[in-house]
Image: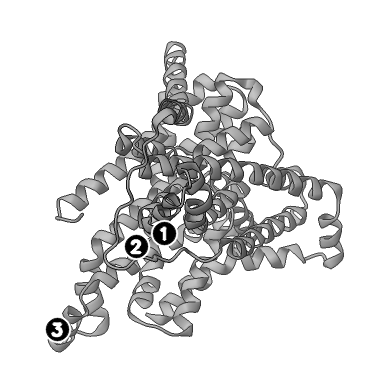
Amino acid sequence: MTVAAVLSAAAALIPLGYLAVRSFEHGAGTVWRVLWRDRTVELAARSLALAGAVTAACLVLGVLAAWLVVRSDLPARRPVAVLLVLPLAVPSYVSGFTWIAEWPVLAGFSGAFLVLTLVSFPYVLLPVAAALRAADPGVEEVARSLGKTSWQTFLVVTLRQVRPAATAGGLLVALYVLSDFGAVSLMRYEAFTMGIYTSYRATFDRTPAAILGCVLVVLAIALTIGERRARGAAAVRSSRGAPRTAAVVPLRRARIPAVLGVLGLITVSLGVPVYSLVRWLVIGSSAGIDMAGLVSAATGTVTVSALGALLTVLMAIPIGILAARHRGPVVRGVELASFAGHALPGITIGLALVFFGIRLAPALYQTTPMLAFAYAVLFLPLAVGAVRTGVSNAPPVLEDVSRSLGKGRAATQLLVTLPLAAPSIVAGAALVFLTCAKELPATLLLRPTEVDTLATELWSKTEGAAFAAAAPYAAVLLVVAALPALLLDRFLHTRGLP
């Protein structure tokens, strides 16, 4: 099991290692020339400016929305909370397609900022809402007893309590913006991911693209370190006894503005994409829909996503079992290595595997197995976490009984441990499938020439401003992403799981 886990973790590190090797292929002088040219500095500044603006906007929207649905007397708080989280299910390039199709003047920074903010603010809302539910209400009650108004209590006490959660959510937003390719490409905003893709396609010398990919990795690492330093310590409950639910704060005169603000946020984040898709579907149907191309893209999406999910789960099983049942430096190192690819943008992983395939594995270059491996590297932590959780929840005593009946370790894990962990493993596989179906940059770089997916077809048609032709691909992509989630929900509930 340890050998299998180490091999899986080592495979996940191949793209990052090969990208670094390729960057220094022509010596350190070439690296420095690429790093200090005006184009690189400009791309870094533009990407950081976009990430900073989107993160700041998401912090404001996410914290306020979380407070309204958790602490205030906002009407219909539960349905509103669900609607506010749903934008996470909309790929950035689908949202970007709908906005640019309706308002072409949004192209550029403003469009990229709007789209990425609308699909990213739930990353802040979710952890802040959880922190608000877990926070000690006694501290806020003391502040109000000392004469502080609800607004002053929110600024002085509540924000301090949720700062670690908000900072963690802000990091997710910043990393998502740095790694995004779909929205910035559709909005024609020259960010770092666009610069990497352009450099890769523009010349036969791919070394500058590799160097830019390493810069993007360094930026992501720097953001992670900065988040840890800025996070601060989580607030500690100061009251004794069982945790209490905080009292609902009446909105009073702010009730109508709060309701209008929440409805406006739901409208622009969900209503506009749905309206635009329906409108362009009607326009496209009158002109005729390329059903053959649509079916081919949907089939390609399901095929490569299913293979990617299968390979990811197979790589995750030994790592997840090892992490759930054993401790030690080897286990920690293997689990940490499995997370390396998830921290990297899809375009960086795709670029590294392009170089790896051309130089060391030409038979695998632009083949479905190579694309499935890219998905496995990118989304391995999603499956590892699911396997680890499922195995941890499986009673070890049942494994002991199996061993006492003469079964070996491998047979016990195959016949006892994995069946008990099956619901969690299926959940992880479904999550990986959904994420693979939405992945764009790695698919663009690595897909076989004869295979089209819904994501790549949507991107190519939108790039040519063929919005009516792109709408069916966007709609089917949302359906493909929704069906596994519904089937998974039914699978779990029929087995009595919460």
x then y, percent, for residue 456? 53, 37
x then y, percent, for residue 89? 42, 40
Nearest the viewer among 4 and 334 is 334
Q: Residue at x 24, y 47 (%)?
A: 489
Circle 2: is it few (<14), some (14-19), or many (20+) Cα within 10 Å? Answer: many
Compare marks 3 and 2 and give the one earlier in the sequence. Answer: 2
Q: Residue furthest top?
A: 286
Which residue type does callout 3 highlight? Val
* Dots 2, 1 in contact, CB < 8 A: yes
Left-right relation of 24 to 228:
right
At mark 1, the secondary structure is helix
Residue occupied by mark 1:
382
At mark 2, the secondary structure is helix
Image quadrant of residue 214? bottom right
Badge number at residue 339: none
Nearest the viewer among 263 and 462 is 263
Badge number at residue 401: 3
Compare marks 1 and 3 and give the one earlier in the sequence. Answer: 1
x then y, percent, for residue 61? 51, 39
Q: Residue at x 20, y 50 (%)?
A: 491
Residue occupied by mark 2:
386
Q: Residue at x 34, y 37 (%)?
A: 73
Tell me the distance, in whole angstroms, between the alpha carbons under discs 1 and 3.
30 Å
Nearest the viewer among 473 and 335 is 335
Q: Is residue 387 above or below residue 36?
A: below
Nearest the viewer among 389 and 127 is 127
Tell me the distance, in whole angstroms, between the alpha carbons under discs 3 and 2.
24 Å
At mark 3, the secondary structure is helix
Which residue type does callout 1 highlight? Leu
Tell me the distance, in whole angstroms, between the alpha carbons under discs 2 and 1.
7 Å
Q: Is residue 2 above or below residue 122?
A: below
